[in-house]
Amino acid sequence: MAIYCIVPKKSGVAEAIKLKNDFAPAYSNRCLAYLQLADYQNAIANCNQALKFMPKNVEAYLNRGLAYYRQGDYQAAMPTAGYAYADNNQFILLKPNDFRAYYNRGLAHAILGNHQQAISDYNLALTNISQSSSLLKADVYNDRGLAHFELLDLKAAMLDFSQAIRLNPNNYRAYYNRGCACGRSGDRSCAVRDFTESLKLNPTNAQAYLNRGIAYHRLGHEQAAIADLQKAVEYFAQQGETKTSEKTFLLLKNLQQQLSSLSEIALVECEGSFKIKTVSLTIQNSKITSLNPFEE
């Protein structure tokens, strides 16, 4: 999600509050400043003050909803998303033609697992957004595609990701997500293509290397798969995702061991074809499974 705003200087806002401590716009502006600084607790506190003195301050509802949405990790964000949902409802009541609240409410629905409702809100956001806002529309299409993906409507998901790419050719998320949809639908060549495009735009995306490595493996391109898994291990470790890095390393070792076994089989082929065929069949039936297959 990317909503762009002008951030007021906190020093000037603080002076305004000192002069008039019930000045709602100053609290609202300070809420926005804290929101941009990712200080969500202070953002919420200042939006609360703004709404105390001006209950119909629409921007304060929007910004408090964003703060609720963004604070904490998403595994613990279910109640937080509920607060965001309520604030966006209030914003819609006060400003029904503003796309932002529909979009943000859609994101809250997605966090809560209500993907069909999320799609409905993304549709309303697209209806109300300016036709000239290509980058913002690309974000909405990308997130609507994710909702379709969660509902296993892969065709609709790919159409949305493709539309996001048309609107913003530098949208690495949309390429990555379309690669996931391709992979889930069984088109590994398409998955490799889109993961490659995503990595051109965001070359440190460890999950893209992992999933492209899985796709290469399933296509039988084992050396390319090994190279990608090695990159995934490296970037997961650099980004502090130690457990994921370790699990990816195990996948890498598993693949390398399979290739080593295949090489040994090839070396003894002239000695006993019946035995070799039996062992080879076992190896061919062994599959590497992605840690988080074709998902973002």
Image (cartoon, grey):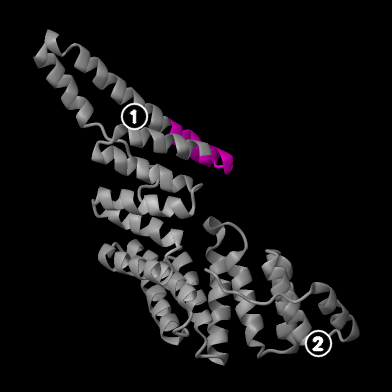
Residue 2 vertical placement versus 26 (above, below)? above
Characterize the local packing of mark 1: few (<14), some (14-19) or many (20 or more) Cα atoms within 10 angstroms. Answer: many
Residue 286 vertical placement versus 133 (above, below)? above
* Number of marks in picture: 2
- Residue under circle 2? 23
> Which residue is at a point 35% across and 47% down the rendered structure image?
293
Q: Nearer the viewer, residue 84 or 103?
A: 103
State if disc 1 and disc 2 touch (CB < 8 Å): no
- Residue under circle 1? 255
Q: Quadrant of residue 121?
A: bottom left
Residue 47 in percent (x, y) is at 70, 78
Magenta stretch, main secondary structure class: helix
In the picture provided, is 287 more to the left or to the right than 208? Answer: left
Q: Nearer the viewer, residue 109 or 284?
A: 284
Residue 60 in percent (x, y) is at 66, 81
Residue 29, numbered circle: none
Helix, strand or loop for disc 1: helix
Residue 209 in percent (x, y) is at 42, 44
Observer able to see residue 147: no
